[in-house]
Image (spheres, grey):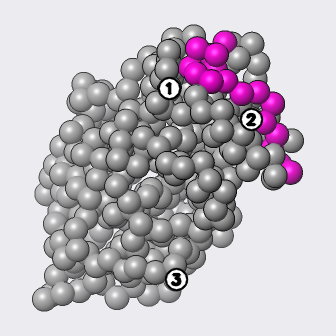
Amino acid sequence: MKKILIIDDSALMRTVLSDIINADSRFQVVDKAKDGIEGLELLKKNTYDAVVLDINMPRMDGITMLKEVQKAKIRAKIMMASTDTKEGAKVTMDALDLGALDFVHKPDRASECRGEDFTKHFINTLAAVAESKAPTISSKAFSFEDAKESRKVVELVTKSASKITGNRIVAIASSTGGPRALQSVIPKLPKNLKTPVVLVQHMPEGFTASLAERLDSLSEVKVKEAAEGDTLQPGWVYISRGGKHMHIVKSGGKSTIHYVDGPTREGVRPCANFMYESLMESDYDEICCVVLTGMGADGTEGIKNLKSKKKVYVIGQEESTCTVYGMPKAVATAGLVDQVVKLDNVAQEIIMHVGVN
């Protein structure tokens, strides 16, 4: 049974979240704290399989606590659960940069937390975090200087990639651990990349725009949350909007973004399977599919179906560099992967495969 620590300043919320967690036989809440100071002391003395952390708390808030956890070199698996996280997408991105593995938006009223939708989402997120690898201790978030340094590595690769021909596209899928993993991939891509990049990261509505802004600030390529009707262009990264399924469709002879509402698939929305399958009818000669860290198997079925119609090259993230070795494992187990690479090498393999102008 997985041991869970809850850190939240509301006594009622601590009780409600405990009830949800303890109702699942896989988990048991073994400790609770009312602020970051109490939580930090517990983390210094005990080991937990996962920590549920609020953001807004007196004495020491969640962001400050994450910084203190890093300073103390504590390798804790933390998920954020806060009413802040709905509009406070930037705060959530800060939390993910500081080592939090995932997050849920907590309803404003404790009574709403008992609803089936929230309960299911909360437990699924907790399960992913509990199964994750604890983050490595890092004293700082990824910066523009890191990006410049990492791009030197791909300069040599870029020279040999200028000879590649054909109409290609890169399609990336990521989930738990993805926002941080993407900082090791997207900022290394050169602005003269020969292809567009489409990307599904499992996130709710409101957060994908913040993720796009953060990646854009670190990158040479342009990164945006894809808008309905966007025409795909080389050197641009289009991140699917949270809460909708992104399809790539032909319109006026060009490949454009089209969003579809509808039920979740693989328990998620956006779902990478839809993105991959929509490319079956595209004008691209070859699709470079990249599957990064994440829980579950999203991407596998879509790539399998895509391979029945198109030439596809699949890059899977190597297990030791994944926060959760779920999605890359599923695509590898299905025999669909052409190459397995460590996270730091994903960008250069993309460049080598799709080329530069």
**Dot placed on the residue nearer the N-terminal end, 1 or 3:** 1
Q: Amino acid at mark 3?
A: Asn
| Of 29 and 321, the residue lying toward us | 29
Task: Give the spatial CA distance, label 1 vs label 3.
Answer: 47 Å
**Dot placed on the residue nearer the N-terminal end, 3 or 2:** 2
Please give the residue where the numbered disc 2 appears in the rendered image.
Answer: 4
Give the crowd class for mark 3: few <14, some 14-19, many >=20 residues within 10 Å.
Answer: some
Please give the residue where the numbered disc 3 appears in the rendered image.
Answer: 305
Please give the residue where the numbered disc 1 appears in the rendered image.
Answer: 57
**Residue 231 is a magenta residue:** no
Q: Is residue 127 above or below residue 118?
A: above
Residue range in magenta is: 25-41
Q: Amino acid at mark 1?
A: Met
Query: Taking the image as drawn, is residue 157 in sight?
Result: no
Q: How many marks?
A: 3
Q: Amino acid at mark 2?
A: Ile
Q: Position of residue 153 (x, y in %)?
A: 31, 34
Q: Quadrant of residue 38?
A: top right
Q: Is mark 1 in CB contact (under 8 Å) with mark 2?
A: no
Q: Position of residue 81 (x, y in %)?
A: 55, 41
As helix, strand or loop, the secondary structure at mark 3 comes to helix
